[in-house]
Image (spheres, grey):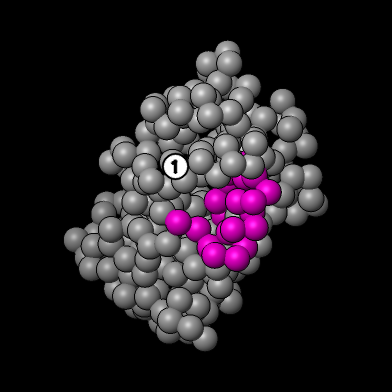
Amino acid sequence: MSDARRPTIELDRPEAWPSDLLDVLTSNRDALRSRERGPLSDRFDAAVYAVVEALQPYSVLGWHCTRLADHEIEDIRADGMALLDVDLVSRRIDAAIRHELISSNHGERLKAVNQAAERYRAGMLWFCFFIPARAGEGGIGDLVRYWGGEAVYNSHDRHPEMGKVIAGIGRPAIVEAEIPIAWCGRNRGLRLAMNIGQRYIIAQGTRSPNSIDVEDNIKRPLPAELVRAVHVFPSPEFLQLSGCLDWHHPL
């Protein structure tokens, strides 16, 4: 196993979680439960960070919803995924021009106006750690309808001309990958640690007022060895993961 590959925890199966993680969760049960039942324990932060430490050797499955040209699908399967930045957007646009998927004029318009440099986008790669269909059409519909990712389509999807251009490039896709928890967020997987604590308490019989769906970003390029699959519309796997057959406006 390489440095990147780690044993994978199935979030929806607490009964199958590794014993070392369960030991930490059990010893911090009362503090973790306080988030769901209140009042918040003064030991809650310490309990969550104990879970963070216990999660460092593990990965979870994540899904990245997007729209990809055929050459981009091949690149991800061969080389993995790069972090978002202005240069990546420019390279993708230039490649789309070379493959005659977009005109030079339209490509320059996409380069001139996009959100790739924004604080909460640049240098990140976002994944959801729940079946994307749970987000519904409102959550993932535009991600798979428009090429370029949110950083590009947010500035162009409502434009009468450019919206049609970016809707015509590529195919809806969902990248399924193993995500090392230690790579997540600014705090080595704090969001996932809280989520796993919540799931553990629910499995113990406590109801939670909070959603169990969680997403986060990584700030390292994702190597190809961690990409399990690129599911492309209309494959059965894509249809199941997206739930798009039930959308108001099907793909």
Mark 1 burial class by Cα count in 10 Å: few <14, some 14-19, many 20+: many
Q: Which residues are magenta?
A: 63-82
Horizontally, is 121 left or right of 138 in the view?
left
In this view, 182 is above or below 1: above
* Residue 75 percent location from the top left of the image: 59, 58
In this view, 32 is above or below 16: above
Horizontally, is 2 left or right of 56 in the view?
right
The quarter of the rendered structure image containing the C terminus is top right
| SS at mark 1 in the image | helix
**Viewer-proximal residue, 62 or 122?**
122
Q: How many marks?
A: 1
Which residue is found at the position 51% from the left and 39% from the top? 93
Q: Is residue 67 magenta?
A: yes
Residue with the mark numbered 1: 89
Horizontally, is 8 left or right of 124 in the view?
right
* Residue 19 percent location from the top left of the image: 48, 84
**Viewer-proximal residue, 32 or 223?**
223
